Amino acid sequence: MWVKELGIVIKNRRNALRITQPYLAELAQISVNTLYKLERGEANPTLDVLEKLADVLGLELKIEVKKTL
């Protein structure tokens, strides 16, 4: 589920910055195919890929742990 939400965040931020998918992939040094899959929520990205995208998009990676009872 979080992968789909992540894809929406990436796509929305990319669109807000008016960056094309191929250009974002180039800037982040990832394949266009990887970016396509991420934005559709079909890929499980590595931390390295997430860091590269966050850096280019001006986003911050944050881990939130929820306690369950």
Image (cartoon, helix red, strand yellow):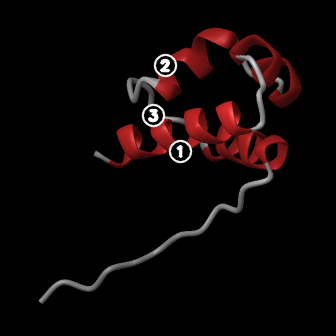
The residue where tag 3 is placed is 44
Query: What's under tag 1, amino acid-wise?
Result: Val
Q: Is residue 9 above or below residue 17?
A: below
Q: Quadrant of the C terminus?
A: bottom left
Secondary structure under the numbered disc 3 in the rendered image: loop
The x and y percentages for residue 53 are 73, 39
**Do labels 1 and 2 touch, CB within 8 Å?**
no
Real-space CA distance between mark 3 and mark 1, rounded to the nearest whole angstrom: 14 Å
**Mark 2 Cα-neighbour bin, 10 Å: few <14, some 14–19, many ≥20:** some
**Mark 3 Cα-neighbour bin, 10 Å: few <14, some 14–19, many ≥20:** some
The residue where tag 2 is placed is 37
Outermost residue on the bottom side: it is 69
Q: Is residue 47 above or below residue 28?
A: below
The residue lying at 82 percent from left, 48 percent from top is: 55
Real-space CA distance between mark 2 and mark 3, rounded to the nearest whole angstrom: 9 Å
The residue where tag 1 is placed is 9
Q: Quadrant of the N terminus?
A: top left
Whichever of callouts 3 and 1 sits on the residue coming sooner in the sequence is 1
The x and y percentages for residue 11 are 57, 32
Query: What's under tag 3, amino acid-wise?
Result: Asn
Query: What's under tag 2, amino acid-wise?
Result: Lys
The x and y percentages for residue 68 are 18, 84
Secondary structure under the numbered disc 2 in the rendered image: helix
In this picture, residue 54 sits left or right of residue 37: right
**Mark 1 Cα-neighbour bin, 10 Å: few <14, some 14–19, many ≥20:** some
**Do labels 2 and 3 touch, CB within 8 Å?**
no
Residue 60 occupies quadrant: bottom right
The residue lying at 69 percent from left, 38 percent from top is: 16
Whichever of callouts 1 and 2 sits on the residue coming sooner in the sequence is 1
Q: Could you say which is closer to the camera, residue 26 or residue 20?
A: 20
Nearer to us: label 2 or label 3? 2
